Image (tube, grey):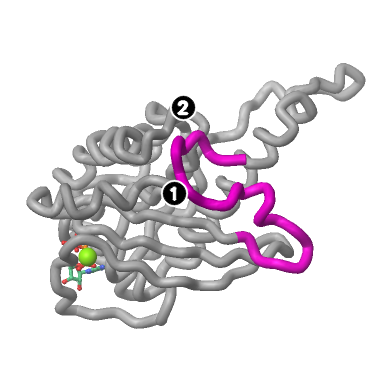
Amino acid sequence: MSNSVAAAPRTSIASNRNSHRSTLLKVVILGDGGVGKSCLMNRFVSNHFDEHSFHTIGVEFLNKDIEINGEAYTLQIWDTAGQERFKTLRTPFYRGSDICLLTYAVDDRTSFKNLALWRSEFLYYADVQDGALFPFIVVGNKVDVPDLEKQISTEEARAWCAENGNSPLVETSAKNATNVEEAFGAAVTAWAKLEAKLERPFVEDTVDLSKQQSPHRSSCCMPMTSAE
Ligand SMILES: Nc1nc2c(ncn2[C@@H]2O[C@H](COP(=O)(O)OP(=O)(O)OP(=O)(O)O)[C@@H](O)[C@H]2O)c(=O)[nH]1
Ligand SMILES: [Mg+2]
């Protein structure tokens, strides 16, 4: 079953899944130039950080094998160029994505404001039919910066997530390796949840009237906040 990405010439996700092989997921990282997308990918794949990382031109990808909840996954991570002038080089690579990381830097308000634009650009060029059924993860990078330099609070970012598809929020630092693995882990978990729901649409919506229902609803955003 695909995540509503039309005309993607790839093996269906459902047929990729079995107990012996790893599930291949295409993960695309989007966000303004300079928010740290390349550094996040390199920290996750090679546990390396480059203080003087160059702007990406077009796209680059790396693979990484991980295990989440006993399932093996191969993440094919696509790091894109955030600068506007590279738009035509990056957008052809959105099709066939299974997961999208929408990234901003906590010390850069413009990059946070642009999250909505990145979301729309992705949905349009990936040709996703129903954005509500696509796993977006919001990543607030550079939480290592001093508090005085931070422009986006966790609360503000959570509020944005709540209003924009209830995406999980993970605040990271590629520099000091805070929550980087968690961000990719949360992305896979969100994908797996959605996949299970799409495969069994009626099972999860069944209400057991014999059980007392909690009056409290769980929050949409993951409390993976900054390391102080
Ligand atoms: N303090 C801090 N700096 C970071 C972090 N991640 C990246 N940087 C720095 O931010 C700058 C830009 O990082 P990149 O990873 O190249 O940014 P990008 O999002 O890939 O930028 P484009 O390729 O132009 O889209 C570099 O100087 C990095 O060293 C972080 O977690 N904390
Ligand atoms: Mg880059």
Indicate whether residue 214 is drawn in magenta.
no
Residue found at x 34% / y 55%:
29
Taking the image as shown, residue 204 lies to the left or right of residue 35, namely right
- Looking at the image, in which quadrant does ligand 2 appear? bottom left
Asked if 202 appears above or below 193 in the picture, the reply is: above
Residue, disc 2: 130
Check disc 2: other Cα within 10 Å, few if <14, some if 14-19, many if 20+: few
In the image shown, does 158 or 128 lie closer to the viewer? 128
* Real-space CA distance between mark 1 and mark 2, rounded to the nearest whole angstrom: 14 Å
Q: Residue at x 56, y 40 (%)?
A: 2
Horizontal relation, residue 168 to residue 66: left or right: left
- Under mark 2, the amino acid is Asp
x, y percent for residue 193: 64, 43
Residue 189 in picture, x, y percent from top left: 59, 51
- Location of residue 2 with respect to 16 vertically, above or below: above
Image point (46%, 71%), residue name: 63
Residue at image location 71% in from the left, 27% down from the top: 201
- The region drawn magenta spans 1-23
Q: Main secondary structure of the magenta part?
A: loop
> Closest to the observer: 191 or 158?
191
- Say what amino acid the circle numbered 1 marks: Ser
| In the displayed structure image, the side of residue 102 where residue 183 appears, left or right | right
